[in-house]
Amino acid sequence: RMMMEATEIARLVAAGELRAEDVLSDHLARIDATNPGINAIVTLTPELALEAARDIDRRVAGGDTVGPLAGVPVGIKDIIETAGIRTTYASPLFKDNVPDEDALTVQRIKAADGVIVGKTNTPEFGLLPTTEPELYGATRNPWNPDLGSGGSSGGACAAVAAGIVPVAHANDGGGSIRIP
């Protein structure tokens, strides 16, 4: 299940053929096994993710319609505000920042029933073409850990490439997705 495409996960979860909680469990195991070597996820939120996954499973079991990302684990770049989840912008100045509100992107992912598993690494304020912030350290290339992941969306791209999550938020103003 871990390496399934997001569309397949969502289809099976919405049909009641796969539980969102099981999908999450598989991905959390993959994160535990893989993330220490690549440093793609810098803030993991398993409790919040489990709550979201169980809610989706309850709604599916009750015959409710769920969103197009039903049960899909999603990483959010650490420059995007997430209510109740640390958002540091990869800066020591914001190392303890926990926003009260979600950014519009996060609101939409949640409304689509994506399951947010945590925050992905980025350079400080997302301003450099490499993902090597002082706060968290470098994100490594999942195929060759001797190399960096590049781009300000390096954590997001490495997480998807490594199968940690099937989908991750990323943005690109100057190569932040294209470089990784």
Image (spheres, helix red, strand yellow):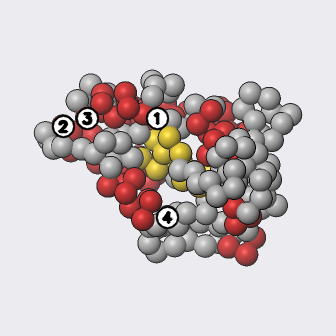
* Circle 4 or circle 2, nearest the eye: 4
Q: Kindly identify the amino acid type of the residue bearing the numbered disc 2.
A: Ala
Q: Amino acid at mark 4?
A: Thr
Alpha carbon of mark 1 to alpha carbon of mark 2: how far? Answer: 19 Å
Q: Is residue 49 left or right of residue 79?
A: left
Q: Which residue is mark 3?
A: 14
Real-space Cα distance between discs 3 and 2?
A: 9 Å
Can you identify the residue that label 1 sits on?
A: 25
Question: Which element type, helix, strand or loop, lies under badge 4?
Answer: loop
Dividing the picture into quarters, in which one does residue 23 lie? top left
Question: Would you say 31 lies left or right of 7 here?
Answer: right
Residue 104 appears at what percent x and percent y? 42, 65
Q: Earlier along the polypeptide chain: callout 3 or callout 2?
A: 3
Residue depicted at x 46% and y 41%: 73
Considering every residue shown, the one lying at the far left of the view is: 63
Could you tell me which quadrant the N terminus lies in? Answer: top left
Q: Which residue is mark 2?
A: 61
Give 128 or 2, whichever is nearer the viewer: 128
**Foreground: 143 or 50?**
143
Return the x and y of residue 27 as percentages of the image width and height. 51, 34
Q: Earlier in the sequence, mark 1 or mark 4?
A: 1
Image quadrant where residue 80 sits = bottom right
Above or below 81: residue 146:
above
Which SS class for mark 3?
Answer: helix
Q: What residue is disc 4 on?
A: 82
Q: Counting other residues with Cα less than 10 Å from the Cα at mark 2, is it few (<14), some (14-19), or many (20 or more)?
A: few
